């Protein structure tokens, strides 16, 4: 009788382990080397292919302690945009990434549904003056002509570029509402630049960038 009880316990334990293994396999898959899980959205429906914003390296600088923030949709684009219209300055944007998020708030506790990260490089050539460059607005243009306007993250941008200096990194924008990520066809950006210690609040602008970036999904 004792042997029968032991055997029964072993079989039951094996069944439980197999059951747990099957459940874990259904809950996630590997996408872009990240574990992506299903989760319940605000309206109670199940959203597949979500992951924590804190796991997205492109947005690590603006995660701001939002440990519960989720990415529920994303798109990455090649932009291949460069501008040398300001003498001695080369500004380029090589990549754009847009994510739709849930439970994301900035450091002012304002909630946003979309984030944009632009990968930039800026070179202030030798013997040029010190510069200040201030991002203005980013507008996502959809295939149907609809425009979604975003705000710049001022606190996460170093606007000073010394002469003979080269910098690279990300510039970030946030959107109150966002959807139809797969229908974005263009990003419209504005930046303004000043020499030396001029204050942007005085209205002095030495150069204005007004860029339109057609998008191509990154493979």
Image (tube, rainbow, N blue to C red):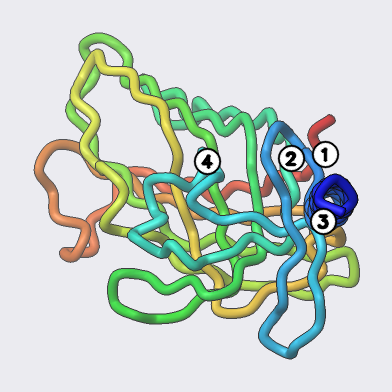
Front label number (1 vs 4): 4
Where residue 135 appears, as percent x and y from the top left, is: 40, 53
Q: Nearer the viewer, residue 126 or 33?
A: 33
Residue that mark 3 sits on: 16
The mark found on residue 77 in the picture is: 2
Q: Earlier in the sequence, mark 2 or mark 3?
A: 3
Q: Say which residue appears at 71% left-offset and 64% top-offset.
A: 72
Q: Earlier in the sequence, mark 1 or mark 3?
A: 3
Q: Residue furthest left?
A: 197
Q: Are marks 1 and 3 in contact (CB under 8 Å)?
A: no
Front label number (4 vs 3): 3
Q: CA distance from mark 1 to mark 4?
A: 18 Å
Q: Earlier in the sequence, mark 4 or mark 3?
A: 3
Q: Are marks 2 and 1 in contact (CB under 8 Å)?
A: yes
Q: Quadrant of residue 71?
A: bottom right
The mark found on residue 216 in the picture is: 1
Q: CA distance from mark 2 to mark 4?
A: 13 Å
Q: Quadrant of residue 98?
A: bottom right
Mark 3 falls on what kind of element?
helix
Tell whether 59 sits left or right of 211.
left
Where residue 22 appears, as percent x and y from the top left, is: 88, 52
Q: CA distance from mark 2 to mark 1?
A: 5 Å
Compared with residue 191, is residue 121 higher up or lower down, i.e. above or below? above
Residue that mark 4 sits on: 58
Q: Quadrant of the C terminus?
A: top right
């Amino acid at each position: 009788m004792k042997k029968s009880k032991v055997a029964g316990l072993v079989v039951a334990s094996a069944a439980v382990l197999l059951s747990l293994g099957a459940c874990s396999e259904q809950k996630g898959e590997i996408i872009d080397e990240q574990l992506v899980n299903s989760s319940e959205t605000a309206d109670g429906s199940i959203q597949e292919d979500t992951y924590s914003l804190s796991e997205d390296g492109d947005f690590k600088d603006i995660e701001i302690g939002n440990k519960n923030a989720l990415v529920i949709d994303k798109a990455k684009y090649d932009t291949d945009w460069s501008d040398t219209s300001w003498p001695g300055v080369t500004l380029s944007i090589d990549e754009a990434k847009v994510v739709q998020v849930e439970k994301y708030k900035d450091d002012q506790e304002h909630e946003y549904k979309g984030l944009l990260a632009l990968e930039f490089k800026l070179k202030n050539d030798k013997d040029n003056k010190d510069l200040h460059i201030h991002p203005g607005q980013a507008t996502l243009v959809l295939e149907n002509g609809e425009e979604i306007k975003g705000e710049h993250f001022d606190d996460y941008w170093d606007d000073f570029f010394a002469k003979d200096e080269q910098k690279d990194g990300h510039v970030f924008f946030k959107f109150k509402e966002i959807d139809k990520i797969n229908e974005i066809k263009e990003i419209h950006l504005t930046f303004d630049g000043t020499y030396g210690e001029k204050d942007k609040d005085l209205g002095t602008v030495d150069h204005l960038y007004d860029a339109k970036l057609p998008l191509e999904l990154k493979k």
